[in-house]
Amino acid sequence: MKHKYRIFKQLQIFLFLSLNISGLAQSVNISLYNDNNLQSVLISPVSSPFGVTFDNSINMVVKPGDTIYLSVNGDFLEVKMLNGSHRTCREFRMTGIDNDATYKVNPVIPVLEEREYDGDFVASFDINRILLVNHIQIDRYLAGVVLTEGGPGRLPEYYKTQAILCRTYLLKHINKHSGEGFNLCDDVHCQAYKTRGSQNKRIIKAINETSGLVIVDRNSELITTAYHSNCGGQTSNSDDVWLKYYPYLKSISDPNCSRGNNGKWRETISVEQWLNYIRENGYKGNIANPVSFKFSQPVRKTHYWIDDFSLPLKKIRNDWDLKSSFFNIDLEDNQLVFNGKGYGHGVGLCQEGAMEMAYQGKNYRQIIGFYYQDVKIKKF
Ligand SMILES: [Zn+2]
Ligand SMILES: [Zn+2]
């Protein structure tokens, strides 16, 4: 009997260690609401209880229905519980009692949308704000990113494609914020991560079926996985948009995205507004006829030209907040009409084109191979 108990105990210790080791290796720290300078926030467990610690010392349990109010108080964090008790600390930690524990975060100052997350979190005081870091298994983090970046209701091969892109980004940039005490932020500066994703079975399946897969270039380096909503029928060269050349981010023509939601756009600007704008940017000529403003891009160009004056299209896109730099300028009723194609910078994978390829029955290898040149998909 004793012998059996010893074996059971050894097995328990082994399982505990191996779970912990793999758990450590497979987790990341993501700063939530990173761009929002959080001053106070409400946190509530959703499905299961959480263990709570203040500065690693006092332990207690909070249950679904409980709400915790965190706020900045001087150089400390003030933690108020619903029952009226409150403490100040430097670090407040909530750890799920089981693997499926989720919690809601509801920023009060500033007022922001409520979001739900998987995993644990640590809140700490960080130069006049609350630093809220989600400690989460990589696959669950990826599920949240794939759902945020790809949206709900997509086909499996599209989700597998997006999962491989997001995993490649994560592993390439795992130290992007390491000096600030976390791996990545939750905004487009890194990858948008605005929700939990583990409730979406199709995404979880796509992540499991592409487990560990990443995209590498011909030198076996992780690639820069640029993507955008819709290329308008032709993707951009990375060096035309970012002045940085990557052999796998080359312009290709894309027949797949013309029927996408972001395939076309239209914007009207008056002749006078446009003349003022180009004059502010150095145009010295005289316009006798606004027909001279017309411009066309049967294929992507890098600059807008009138006579010997030119302006980079990406600057025009930026200054006028246009959906893309892939537009023609036409003259209608004495107004300039920008007839545009696509949405986004146009570099790398076109998401609406990739969705269409998935509808046509293409698999993730074919989709990735179409948008990124001369790359390989391999196990990290
Ligand atoms: Zn970031
Ligand atoms: Zn496209």
Image: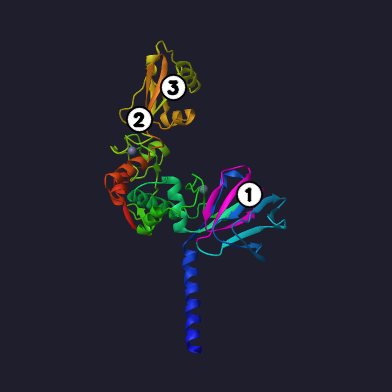
**How many residues crowd mark 3 within 10 Å: few (<14), some (14–19), many (20+)?**
some
Asked if one can make out residue 343 in the rendered structure from this viewpoint, the answer is: yes
**In the rendering, at what x and y percent does residue 176 appear?**
50, 52
The secondary structure type at the circle numbered 2 is loop
**In the rendering, at what x and y percent does residue 307 appear?**
38, 19
Q: Which mark is residue 92?
A: none
In whole angstroms, how far apart are the C-alphas of marks 3 and 1?
Answer: 42 Å
**How many residues crowd mark 2 within 10 Å: few (<14), some (14–19), many (20+)?**
some
Circles 3 and 2: CB distance less than 8 Å? no
The amino acid beneath tag 2 is Lys
Q: Is residue 183 above or below residue 61?
A: above
**In the rendering, at what x and y percent does residue 168 appear?**
40, 53
**In the rendering, at what x and y percent does residue 219 appear?**
34, 54
Q: Find disc 1 in the rendering and name its residue.
A: 41
Q: Which mark is residue 268?
A: 3
Q: Does 120 appear in magenta?
A: yes
Which of the pair 119/245 is nearer the observer?
119
Residue beneath the point at 30% across and 28% down: 298
Question: In front: mark 3 or mark 1?
Answer: 1
Locate the C terminus by quadrant.
bottom left
The secondary structure type at the circle numbered 1 is strand
Q: Residue most toward the top?
A: 288
Return the disc, 3 or 2, that comes first in the chain's sequence: 3
The residues colored magenta run: 100-129
The yes-or-no answer for disc 3 within 8 Å of ligand 2 is: no
The amino acid beneath tag 3 is Thr
Q: Find disc 2 in the rendering and name its residue.
A: 301
Q: Does 343 appear in magenta?
A: no
